[in-house]
Amino acid sequence: MEAQKTAVDAVVILTGCDREAVAAFIRRMYLAGVRDPKRLTFKGLQEMARG
């Protein structure tokens, strides 16, 4: 759970995107098996850059 919070906070701060959209994406990645906060953040940044 802490990994998700860390990743969401980092992506929101770096991109300024909607917190709910970021949280939903990070939650899906976490449930898919990605547990590392750095990897979650990286994937989140990639997704938010796509728009």
Image (cartoon, grey):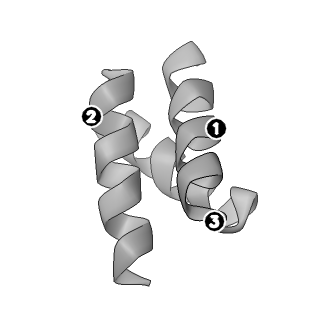
Q: How far apart are the two marked residues, 2 and 1, measured between alpha carbons?
A: 14 Å
Compared to residue 18, the image places residue 37 above or below, namely above
Compared to residue 23, the image places residue 32 above or below, namely above
| Residue 34 in view of the camera | no
Where does the N terminus fall, quadrant-wise? top right
> Disc 2 marks which amino acid?
Arg
Q: How far apart are the two marked residues, 1 and 3, measured between alpha carbons?
A: 12 Å
From the image, tell me which residue sits under label 1: 9
Residue 51 position within the rendered picture, expressed as x and y whole percent measured from the top left: 44, 84
Dots 3, 2 in contact, CB < 8 A: no
From the image, tell me which residue sits under label 3: 21
Residue 36 position within the rendered picture, expressed as x and y whole percent measured from the top left: 31, 21
Q: Residue at x 55, y 39 (%)?
A: 10
Q: Which mark identifies residue 47?
A: none
Q: How far apart are the two marked residues, 3 and 2, measured between alpha carbons?
A: 17 Å
Name the image quarter holding residue 2. top right
Residue 15 position within the rendered picture, expressed as x and y whole percent measured from the top left: 55, 62
Residue 30 position within the rendered picture, expressed as x and y whole percent measured from the top left: 40, 35
Mark closest to the chain's N terminus, 1 or 3: 1
Mark closest to the chain's N terminus, 2 or 1: 1
Q: Residue at x 38, y 57 (%)?
A: 45
Q: Residue at x 59, y 41 (%)?
A: 8
Q: Which mark identifies residue 39?
A: 2
Q: Is 20 in front, or is 10?
A: 10
